[in-house]
DNA sequence: CTGAAAGCGCTTACAG
DNA sequence: CTGAAAGCGCTTACAG
């Protein structure tokens, strides 16, 4: 059950493996192989259903037609949907995707970079964790293109494709104010990464722009690595400690999901008693009663950009860095209807 | 920025590449290399942070330490969660995962098998589509292990890891009857694949066992490839056409999600007016008001079994086929509370 | 106890 | 217009 090789074709065509290789790589014209030979070889290759051995080719050329995709958590719908788009887009160029999740864990992320490196992927799509700056820089020295997604390091020159998180936070804030909410809070993570900072700063600026300054006691920051019950308990405590609060912005979709549970368990009605808007859309937000407003990311568009930038860089390495910043969409639903 | 190779180590240690290869592959003892040389080589390899070139090794040995994972839809939480478990488990054995989605499309599935084959993956984990029997059989002739998941072909001898779908359907049926529902229907797909058939047959048998025979007009089958609005419209029509219905079993999680919308839009209250239970758990079911009962699959356990069987077969190919059938869990929630 | 050599399947600089 | 040969980085049967 051995696959058939370039040698087999050469033998059948009565030419050398060299000639076969040229023809099959579309260099027939360029190498001035005769029309007859080109046709003959193509026919035999088709008949034998020849498939080049990617390992051998990779060993020789250093190209594996494989890209590495590192997400934070493949089980999070934002990332799994994005992964699907990336896979589809990469497929169009004949690339396959090796994927892994970091769980937002630095050591795991470092291990993954190491593995992908010695697997010789042609390019990297990375959701970086905190502290990964040095590793990204080192990896860049290998000359393989890297695209950071969802977030980036302001101090490291890299390609990135991200959402305009500042604008997203800003839009969420102004929407809440325009709906008539007065005492507006934010629940975010303790993460210091740029995407969380931007959401926060945009939100604060949005409130300020409409003269509703964000108050210190209306800010709640939660660590990433807690279990569900702990999240919910802490959120309830926060809500109870600030009874004046009449609307909240949740800075990630999972915080929003926990938020629904926390608010519900306090007997508050979303929209009327407590306005709510979350970052990132989710099936749950669409289907919940009442439905939940959110700031949505254009996932399809994002995936297409990511792969496009990567393919450009693979085919045409440049020194300049590509930065793509996509606009968020405000999905207005029932949870921000005060009346 | 070339990686360092076995040759570099050989040079530094003053031995041949052969010896280095033996030592680094743990065959030092077996090949009776002296302790001194083994230590020396190990030390140098560690210092140089030697990583074997997987392509070269793969070309020589035919093993790539890569497995192919083909799911129906990576954006479906059931599959993305499973993918995560598979990735974690495979990682423990040093294997990486190449994944793809079929979208339940035969041609796409065939293309994926082709690609994975000439990428020389060491094993396959496949969610088969209808009509893939021949391709699976052909692929098995290559001698690489294949594990079918979620469903299998009764007429093709393969390894598989699946849920006991019959039991799941049975449990759903008896639960609804025991809760006091009398006019019970089922919404399933037009798929003829074994997992759907088993769910249906189990459900029918469960009802029968409690003397509530399933009536023809209480059965609704829907094609897979529709858009959301079409699904919901068709479900509403079905519900309206059988007003006596007081409970429904949805045979997949996405049908259940559409079902919630359809039932809600008819102004019926889940649980009291219309009992509902779905196959496959989903965040939405847990968080919905009212929460939705379901038949859940043990995803962690399933992923662990899948990888274990595959690794066993890779390391120790046998002629016998492994069949793992896991038990479902009934998650009882508010949507099946009649009172 | 250790090494020279062949070979996995390709690509490509070089030669004619 | 075409081919012989080297080499990518490994592993392993063979020889001593």
Image (cartoon, coloured by chain):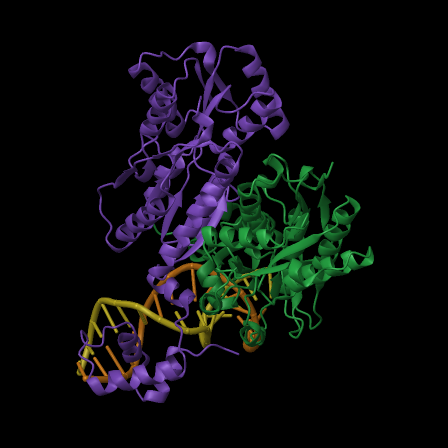
Chain colours: A green, B purple, C orange, D yellow
For residue D10, above or below residue B237:
below
The residue lying at 47 percent from left, 77 percent from top is B3
Task: In this rendered view, identify the residue nearer to me: A89 or C8.
Answer: A89
Residue B252 is situated, as x and y percent measured from the top left of the image, at 46, 30
Residue B115 is situated, as x and y percent measured from the top left of the image, at 47, 48
For residue A225, above or below residue B158:
below
Q: Quadrant of residue B54?
A: bottom left
Tell me if I can see residue B41 in this picture: yes
In this picture, residue A275 sits left or right of residue A22: right
Tell me if I can see residue A44 in this picture: no
The residue lying at 55 percent from left, 76 percent from top is A134
Residue B33 is situated, as x and y percent measured from the top left of the image, at 20, 81
How many numbered circles does the render carry?
Answer: 0
For residue A337, above or below residue B262:
below
Residue placed farthest to the right in the image? A210
The residue lying at 29 percent from left, 16 percent from top is B209
């Amino acid at each position: 059950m051995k696959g058939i090789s370039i040698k087999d074709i050469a033998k059948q065509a009565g030419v050398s493996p060299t000639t076969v290789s040229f023809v099959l790589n579309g260099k027939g014209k360029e190498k001035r192989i005769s029309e007859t030979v080109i046709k003959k070889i193509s026919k035999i290759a088709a008949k034998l259903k020849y498939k080049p051995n990617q390992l051998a080719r990779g060993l020789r050329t250093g190209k594996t037609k494989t890209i590495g995709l590192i997400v934070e958590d493949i089980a999070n719908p934002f990332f799994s949907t994005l992964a699907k788009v990336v896979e589809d887009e990469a497929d169009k160029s004949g690339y396959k995707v090796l994927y892994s999740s970091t769980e937002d864990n630095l050591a795991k992320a470092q291990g993954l970079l190491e593995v992908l490196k010695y697997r010789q992927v042609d390019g990297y799509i990375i959701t970086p964790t905190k502290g990964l700056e040095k590793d990204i820089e080192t990896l860049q020295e290998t000359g393989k293109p890297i695209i950071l997604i969802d977030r980036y390091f302001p101090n490291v020159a890299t390609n990135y494709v991200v959402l305009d998180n500042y604008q997203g936070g800003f839009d969420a804030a102004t929407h809440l104010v325009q709906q008539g909410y007065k005492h507006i809070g934010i629940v975010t993570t303790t993460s210091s990464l740029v995407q969380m900072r931007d959401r926060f700063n945009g939100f604060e600026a949005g409130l300020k722009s409409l003269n509703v300054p964000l108050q210190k006691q209306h800010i709640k920051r939660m660590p990433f690595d807690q279990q569900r019950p702990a999240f919910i308990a802490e959120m309830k405590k926060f809500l109870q400690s600030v009874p004046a609060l009449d609307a909240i912005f949740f800075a990630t979709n999972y915080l929003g999901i926990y938020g629904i549970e926390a608010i519900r368990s306090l007997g508050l009605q979303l929209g009327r008693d407590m306005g709510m808007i979350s970052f990132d859309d989710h099936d749950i937000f669409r289907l919940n009663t009442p439905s939940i407003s959110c700031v949505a990311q254009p996932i399809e568009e994002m995936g297409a950009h990511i792969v496009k930038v990567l393919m450009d860089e693979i085919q045409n390495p440049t020194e300049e860095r590509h930065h793509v910043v996509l606009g968020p969409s405000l999905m207005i639903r029932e949870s921000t209807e005060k009346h």
